[in-house]
Amino acid sequence: MTIRVLIIDDSPTMRAILLARLREQHDIEVVGTASDAVEGREMIKRLDPDVVTLDIEMPGMNGLDFLEKIMTLRPTPVIVVSGMTRDGSEATARALGLGAVDCYAKYDPEGRLALHDGGELAAMVRAAAQVRFHRPVLRALAEESRRSIRRDTRLIAIGSSTGGVEALQVLLRDFAGDCPPTLIVQHVNPRFAPAIARTLDQACPARVQVAGQDMPLRAGNVYLAAEADCHLTVRAGPTGALHARLRRGEPVSGHIPSVDALFASAAAELGGGAVGILLTGMGQDGARGLLAMSRAGAHTIAQDEDSCTVFGMPRAAISLGAARVVAPLDRIARHALHQAA
């Protein structure tokens, strides 16, 4: 099946670059290009593309406002195209929170226009074309439930990918301010991770921050993987104190940082003292690690199909028998914090 793509970008140069990259792919067709939100809106209505690439730093109606309208009125898989400035990273994080499925960087780590990307954009388009949209009904936990967190849980480990930033905002909203220390691996360009942490921090009663090497893990804190070439894992010291560990190495399950690497360390270091949560995402990263956690006695949870943007990672875990609970997104916090139905 051919994937039909619409490019929206105010830069003629960037439109030409994106068009050239996608035209090289036999299974992708660029059905149109637009220079602003007004033109883009009309082309979305007329062409009904499978995927939209959207510059979020445009004159007139900016990309964030336009994205919010798309996701409200005509949900369509959107890949945001962003610069690497601080403002660009913050906007990208907000875009992912609004429902964009991925982010594509205009520039390489040295700040040069990325003229060759080795198929990265095409891979994002293929992943986006498999997205399904579901807007869960959000239910807040009762205050008395917030105060009854299980005290035998020493760590919560979370993995997510496509659609994950939006899902994490929903999940973390129901985390209490004194939740167990929580580690997250979200598949995203690591250069956007600090901005994503700040975005999640605004949604979460606990404090959300980027994980650092040997950082003590404390209750009421959530730590997000942000190093491009390091796996985020947990280490228990001789006294039982928990610390984040950033471990260099090869990709695990095709990713670095990898959800499987995080979950495997939680299984080895904490056994039944941990909770593992696998959210929306493409592929199988996290499935084997969640199985290792379950076999070690941990409480393991997978997001259900109806509330996933992409059911790939949870489906893989469920097929292995790794998830003790399969739950809709808006019920996962209750299962994680209280292990109650």
Image (cartoon, rainbow, N blue to C red):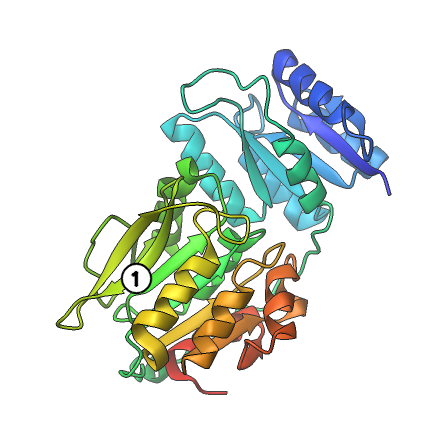
Question: Badge 1 is on which residue?
Answer: 234
Secondary structure under tag 1 reads strand
- Residue sitting nearer the eye, 58 or 308: 308
- Height in image: 63 above or below 203? above
| Residue 203 % position (x, y) | 39, 57
- Residue sitting nearer the eye, 311 or 39: 311
Q: Tell me what residue is drawn at x 35 percent, y 75 percent.
A: 274
The residue type indicated by label 1 comes to Val
| Residue 34 % position (x, y) | 72, 22
- Height in image: 71 above or below 239? above
Q: Residue furthest left?
A: 239
**For mark 1, does the 10 Å Cα neighbourhood hold few (<14), some (14 to 19), or many (20 or more) residues?**
many
- Residue sitting nearer the eye, 145 or 3: 3
Q: Residue furthest bottom?
A: 341
* Residue 326 visible in this rendered orientation of the protein: yes
In the picture, measured across the screen, residue 138 lies left or right of residue 19, that is left
- Height in image: 323 above or below 47? below
In the picture, measured across the screen, residue 217 lies left or right of residue 29, that is left
| Residue 111 % position (x, y) | 42, 18
Q: Residue furthest top?
A: 13
Residue 271: quarter of image: bottom left
In the picture, measured across the screen, residue 127 lies left or right of residue 317, that is right
| Residue 246 % position (x, y) | 30, 49
Q: Tell me what residue is drawn at x 65 percent, y 30 percent.
A: 119
Q: Tell me what residue is drawn at x 58 percent, y 60 percent.
A: 280
Residue 325: quarter of image: bottom right
* Residue 140 visible in this rendered orientation of the protein: no
Residue 262: quarter of image: bottom left
